Image: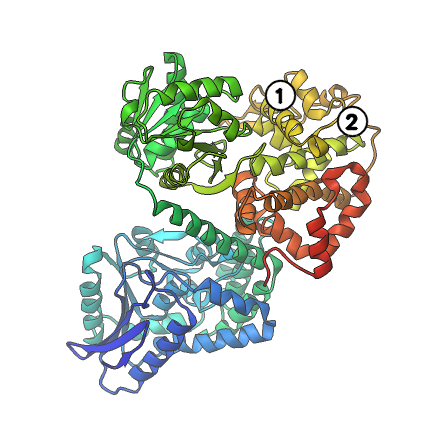
């Protein structure tokens, strides 16, 4: 044994070769934490001290190769100065450079996932052999940074500037076929043959069949493009990458700049450019927000995994109501491998649900994500029915009928008579109390809420709502089913609107008050979209559906009359009375037409200002800052109230609920992260001038106490 550690071993194998094996003890995956990096440095130093090594192979004893850096450790570096970050990175580069400079050929056996720093290690070796089921990539831009361990230097020299720009600035994971086509790996074989194939390639390189020195020279010298070719490659990429990244996410353009600046440099100089650019990004507020989101997402997954331990998987599901929502639920379940019954009261409704599922599947086929055979197989997993015939075998039911308490209660009581005693029944309600609906059931402990967001196939969040009598078994199975559908479940307690709608409607209330005071709704939309929302409040109401918004607004006003009730008619009421339901009937705050591809396009409707007469006050100009303050203050305070009232368990779950449920700007990290970044004292000062607008604009006593004590929601 050349080296033995807790994450890495290095041993001599037949033929005069050395194998370095990653196997991090006490963890299901290999990752680059400080322990692993220190051991890698020591192992490489031990190999360099040997004089008779013919070649070195890097492999993994786990199903994955290396998933990347341990972000919980790595992100601690981001609080340091830029100079300290650069110094730290250059120290780590010494390890990867030492591997690249070994006096013998090197190969990586990529048997599974190799991402971020894990793939940067692969790039530091001369050759790469990849398993056919493995994935590789440099996804760092999703965290607001870019590859910092040589990725922006080695990959462009290996696969060309155009390909590297797409790999690095897009941050996508690449399957084996694409990695081989682009030249990022040298061979693709069956997973079980990866080690043998890598050893065979290493043997041939040692015997002079493959010129490893030529490959090494290519990676350590300037990019082989003349000035005109470089200009064409980088300038054409800037427009595309800049447009795709948008103004709020600097990492993709910073990565492109780093690659361009170092294009004519040797490796060692290029690495310094990479490190300096990385340090600038690492200290950016966007990076802090996106890294925070990653950690919160990991936490949410951990919470839902704990629920999964206490239940059995759903083998057969059912959905009641075959409209757009029911069809979406059926599609999502069947496409993820859980067969589902889809029940309605007439053939026309069932056909609507099947048409929705078929449309979504056709979209997958058109995009090349599925073939016709797979589509047919998925459709066979959806069983349309007019009767309860097979409901005795169902593990979980999703009720998705019209948002009417009496109708839902009747349907829930009916289905309870048709299922087994341990079947879990859920309601896909967006506003109606789960505790109230449970009163219609004989087994209320087997009932909870399962709130999907529209469109089901796109929106990642599912709110699992715990009523007063919902059992842990009901919650656990519902969480497990949501996860099996590829969704992120967040468990919340029952109240009007639950978490997401309870927070969203104060935001809409802020919008209505702005209109009352003379704001132009198109300007409010533009300002909030510039702030980072995917769509402004008027456009969002059109997408949600004005009828849905009007119903939910009434529920929220009844549930929280002190702050969500309002005197007289507001903009949502007026649009509803005029039957302008938004995209549902092509007219709302805006009008909608189909383009040549059949996609709805938003257009200004010149008639709307007149229709809002009496609702919109005397026109006046609002600064961007005032619009943002008046929209964000009620949303943030209501998020805090949900946390203080125990509707949501943790700040992490609150923020992820808003990110996944209503499109809160990810680069701002969620409402509670936004408060932390601003500082609660600064928020109180921002809110103070608007206190006369009512309780929605008045921070809680606990917020004031926290501000006085300098407390934050996420601590350090």
Q: State which tag comes first along the sequence, 2 or 1.
A: 1
| Of residues 562 and 625, the one drawn nearer to the viewer in this rendering | 562
Regarding mark 1 in the picture, which secondary structure is present there?
loop
Position of residue 103 relative to residue 294, above or below, is below
| Of residues 675 and 410, the one drawn nearer to the viewer in this rendering | 410
Whole-percent x, y for residue 434 in the image: 50, 30
Whole-percent x, y for residue 661 in the image: 53, 39
Whole-percent x, y for residue 33 in the image: 41, 69
Viewed as shown, does residue 176 lie left or right of 78? left
Name which residue lies at 66% across and 59% down.
Answer: 711
Instruction: Evaluate whether residue 660 shows in this view.
Output: yes
| Of residues 635 and 542, the one drawn nearer to the viewer in this rendering | 635
Whole-percent x, y for residue 690 in the image: 79, 42
* Residue occupied by mark 1: 587
**Quadrant of the rendered image containing residue 216:** bottom left
Position of residue 72 relative to residue 568, above or below, is below
| Disc number placed over residue 616 in the picture, else none | 2
Regarding mark 2 in the picture, which secondary structure is present there?
loop
Viewed as shown, does residue 452 lie left or right of 58? right
Viewed as shown, does residue 357 lie left or right of 284? left
From this viewpoint, which residue is outermost toward the left?
14
Name which residue lies at 50% across and 35% down.
Answer: 468
**Quadrant of the rendered image containing residue 164:** bottom left
Marks 2 and 1, how far apart in space? 19 Å
Please state which of the two labelled residues, at mark 2 or mark 1, is closer to the viewer.
2
Colour scheme in the image?
A: rainbow
């Amino acid at each position: 044994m050349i080296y033995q550690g807790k994450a890495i071993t290095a041993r001599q194998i037949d033929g005069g070769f050395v194998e370095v094996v990653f196997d991090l003890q006490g963890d299901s995956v290999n990752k680059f934490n400080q322990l692993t990096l220190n051991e890698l440095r020591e192992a490489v130093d031990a190999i360099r001290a040997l004089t008779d090594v013919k070649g070195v192979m890097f492999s993994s004893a786990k199903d994955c190769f290396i998933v990347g850096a341990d972000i919980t450790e790595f992100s601690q570096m981001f609080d340091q100065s830029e100079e300290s970050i650069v110094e730290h990175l250059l120290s780590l580069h010494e390890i990867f450079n030492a591997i690249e400079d070994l006096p013998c050929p090197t190969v990586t056996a990529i048997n599974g996932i190799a991402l971020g720093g894990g793939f940067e290690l692969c790039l530091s070796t001369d050759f790469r052999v990849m398993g056919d089921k493995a994935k590789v990539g440099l996804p760092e831009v999703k965290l607001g940074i870019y590859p910092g361990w040589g990725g922006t230097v080695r990959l462009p020299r290996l696969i060309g500037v155009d390909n590297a720009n797409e790999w690095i600035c897009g941050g996508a994971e690449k399957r084996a076929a694409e990695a081989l086509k682009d030249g990022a790996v040298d061979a693709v074989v069956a997973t079980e043959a990866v080690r043998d194939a890598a050893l065979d390639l290493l043997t041939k390189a040692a015997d002079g069949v493959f010129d490893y020195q030529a490959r090494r020279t290519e990676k350590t010298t300037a990019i082989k493009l003349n000035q005109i070719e470089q200009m064409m490659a980088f300038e054409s990429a800037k427009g595309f990458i800049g447009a795709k990244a948008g103004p709020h996410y600097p990492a993709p353009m910073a990565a492109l700049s780093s690659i361009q600046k170092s294009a004519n440099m040797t490796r060692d100089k290029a690495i310094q450019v990479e490190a300096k650019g990385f340090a600038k990004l690492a200290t950016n507020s966007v990076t802090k927000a996106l890294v925070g989101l990653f950690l919160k997402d990991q936490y949410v997954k951990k919470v839902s995994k704990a629920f999964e331990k206490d239940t059995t998987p759903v083998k057969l599901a059912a959905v009641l109501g075959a409209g757009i929502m029911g069809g979406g639920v059926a599609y999502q379940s069947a496409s993820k491998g859980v067969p589902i019954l889809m029940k309605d009261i007439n053939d026309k409704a069932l056909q609507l649900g099947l048409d929705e599922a078929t449309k979504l599947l056709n979209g997958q086929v058109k995009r090349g994500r599925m073939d016709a055979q797979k589509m047919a197989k998925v459709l066979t997993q959806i069983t349309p029915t007019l009767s309860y015939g097979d409901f005795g075998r169902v593990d979980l039911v999703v009720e998705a009928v019209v948002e009417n308490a009496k109708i839902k209660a009747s349907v829930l009581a009916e289905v309870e008579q048709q299922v087994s005693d341990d079947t879990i029944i859920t309601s896909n309600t967006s506003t109606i109390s789960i505790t109230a609906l449970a009163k219609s059931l004989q087994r209320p402990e087997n009932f909870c809420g399962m709130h999907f967001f529209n469109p089901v196939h796109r929106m990642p969040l599912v709110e699992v709502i715990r009523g007063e009598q919902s059992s842990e078994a009901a919650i656990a199975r519902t969480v497990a089913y949501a996860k099996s559908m590829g969704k992120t479940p967040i468990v919340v307690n029952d109240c009007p609107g639950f978490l997401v709608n309870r927070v969203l409607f104060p935001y809409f209330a802020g919008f209505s008050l702005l209109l009352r005071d003379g704001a132009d709704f198109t300007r409010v939309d533009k300002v909030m979209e510039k702030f980072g929302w995917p769509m402004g409040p008027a456009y969002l109401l059109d997408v949600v559906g004005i009828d849905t918004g009007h119903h939910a607004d009434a529920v929220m006003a009844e549930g929280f009359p002190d702050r969500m009730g309002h005197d007289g008619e507001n903009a949502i009421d007026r649009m509803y009375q005029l039957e302008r339901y938004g995209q549902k009937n092509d007219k709302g705050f805006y009008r909608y037409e189909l383009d040549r591809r059949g996609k709805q396009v938003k257009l200004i409707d010149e008639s709307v200002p007149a229709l809002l007469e009496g609702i919109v006050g005397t026109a006046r100009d609002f600064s961007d800052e005032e619009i943002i303050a008046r929209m964000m203050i009620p949303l943030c305070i209501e998020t805090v109230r949900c946390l203080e009232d125990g509707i949501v368990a943790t700040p992490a779950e609150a923020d992820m609920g808003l990110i996944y449920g209503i499109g809160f700007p990810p680069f701002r990290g969620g409402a509670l992260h936004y408060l932390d970044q601003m500082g609660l004292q600064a928020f109180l000062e921002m809110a103070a001038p608007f206190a006369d607008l009512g309780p929605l604009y008045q921070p809680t006593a606990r917020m004031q106490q926290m501000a006085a004590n300098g407390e934050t929601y996420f601590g350090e």
